[in-house]
Amino acid sequence: MLKKLIRRKQQTISTNLYDRKKLAQQEQLPNHIAIIMDGNGRWAKKRALPRIAGHHEGMMTVKKITRFANEVGIKALTLYAFSTENWKRPKLEVEFLMRLPEEFLGTYLPELIEQNVQVKMMGNLDSLPAHTKKAVVNAMEKTAANDGLILNFALNYGSRDEIVQAVQQIACEVKNGTRSADTISEELLNDYLMTKGLPEPDLLIRTSGEVRLSNFMLWQLAYTELWFTDTLWPDFDEACLMEAIESYQKRNRRYGGLKGEEVK
Ligand code: FPP
């Protein structure tokens, strides 16, 4: 009896989600969603587990959310998996985090390929451990021709570092005479950032109740809609993503200007 009731409740939840997904797809969907996946440590602590258990559960959420974002029809999903500041964490935690891309791609790559997902990465690839780099490069190569959802991992990524690198490259070109300073524009800088070719995020999600950007896509988020939730990343699920998308669809994006009625 109890089992029947639970099954019925689960069916209702998934039917609701299905309906909400259909409804959301009739409106303007965010093309690009970026997520600061926060709260793995607190999730583990609440269960008296080591922090790495939280990261592992967080990886399972990555699977769930990638699958769902693809089903909804999102074009690009950028996930902040490891920042340039995260190297300061205890050695064992860093080592564990550096094993996650391997584990994730080791088990999930065939499904990503089948789902037409293209894996990308932004961040400093060369200073990753060899095994992490190998797993990521292999996934990027195997999915390069796919044209479905872009799954972009921010790995060893820092936004200020990204901007400095872009400015250095442009400055070199000016110095050696291949470019004049007056050709420097927003579009040009975009082309030197690690997000070259990607649309700017329409929606940024940060989990776990923290309300800051933590050196994430500072340039690219200039006009992005922000959505914060207290839910810890390992507890984040399809319904949470739907809530964020629905909230985005109610926003009035003006990009500093006015819209329709407001102009009169
Ligand atoms: C922040 O939570 C989370 C991270 C630094 C790591 C995020 C990584 C994952 C979610 C898994 C990535 C998966 C793949 C496939 C690369 P925190 O540890 O700072 O949490 P806390 O604030 O509660 O301590």
Image (cartoon, rainbow, N blue to C red):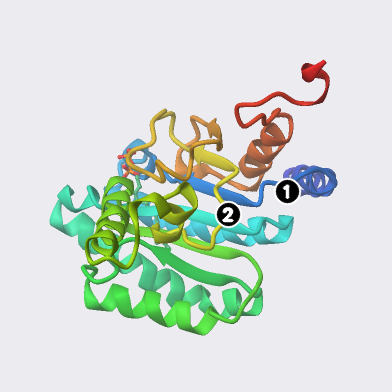
Provide the residue designation for mark 2: 199
Q: Position of residue 193 (x, y in %)?
A: 40, 57
- Residue occupying image coordinates x 66% and y 29%: 254
Label disc, if present, on residue 3 of the rendered structure = 1
The quarter of the displayed image where residue 71 is located: bottom right
Which residue is nearer to you in this view: 115 or 160?
160
The quarter of the displayed image where residue 6 is located: top right
Please determine whether, in this image, residue 128 is positioned above or below residue 239. Answer: below
Q: Find the distance from the CA under tag 2 to the CA under tag 1.
A: 46 Å
Which residue is nearer to you in this view: 53 or 122?
122
Label 1 Cα crowd, 10 Å radius (few <14 / some 14-19 / many 20+): few
Q: Position of residue 261 (x, y in %)?
A: 83, 19
Residue type indicated by callout 2: Pro
Q: Position of residue 183 (x, y in %)?
A: 42, 54
Residue type indicated by callout 1: Lys
Q: Is residue 83 visible?
A: no
Question: Where does the N terminus fall, quadrant-wise?
Answer: top right
Q: How many marks?
A: 2
First reached walking from the N terminus: tag 2 or tag 1: 1
Label 2 Cα crowd, 10 Å radius (few <14 / some 14-19 / many 20+): few
Compared across the picture, whether 7 is left or right of 139 comes to right
